[in-house]
Image: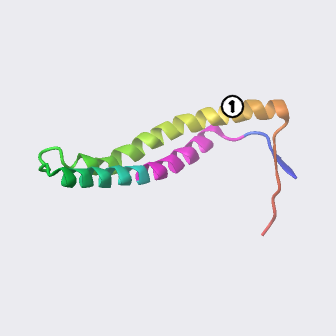
Amino acid sequence: MTKIKKVGMFSFAKLYAVMLALSGFFVGLVFAFSSLYSKNMTGESIGRFGGLGLLAILVIPLIYALLGFVVGAFGAVVFNVVSRIIGGLEVELEQA
């Protein structure tokens, strides 16, 4: 068994930001399609702000990435503190 005793804060924050940005992209897709669909169901004209639902495909992943970076950095700090107290996280590695 190998122990992980410390993770790099910036490295972990980047990883978490990318993971949340990908999930945010799918949330943005759902939001965009649902906003387009609801406008068609109600019979309203698209008007000046009709394309804002499509903007969600860009805005939501950016917000998720920013929050993911902050939460990932905080999580890395918490992991490092707790890991120091309990002695690390045991993982089993195998060479390919």
x then y, percent, for residue 38? 25, 51
x then y, percent, for residue 65? 47, 43
56 to 76, vertically: above or below: below
What's the residue type where badge 1 is placed?
A: Val
Q: Which residue is depicted at the point 44% across and 48% down?
A: 24
Total labels: the figure holds 1
Q: For the residue labelled by badge 1, is the local secondary structure a helix, a strand or a loop?
A: helix
Q: Is residue 46 left or right of residue 94?
A: left
The residue singled out by tag 1 in the image is 78
Q: Answer with the quarter of the image where residue 75 lies.
A: top right
**Quadrant assignment for the C terminus:** bottom right
* Residue 20 part of the magenta segment: yes
What stretch of residues is rendered in magenta? 7-25
Q: Is residue 94 left or right of residue 67?
A: right
Q: Which residue is depicted at the point 65% across and 36% down?
A: 76
2 to 86, vertically: above or below: below
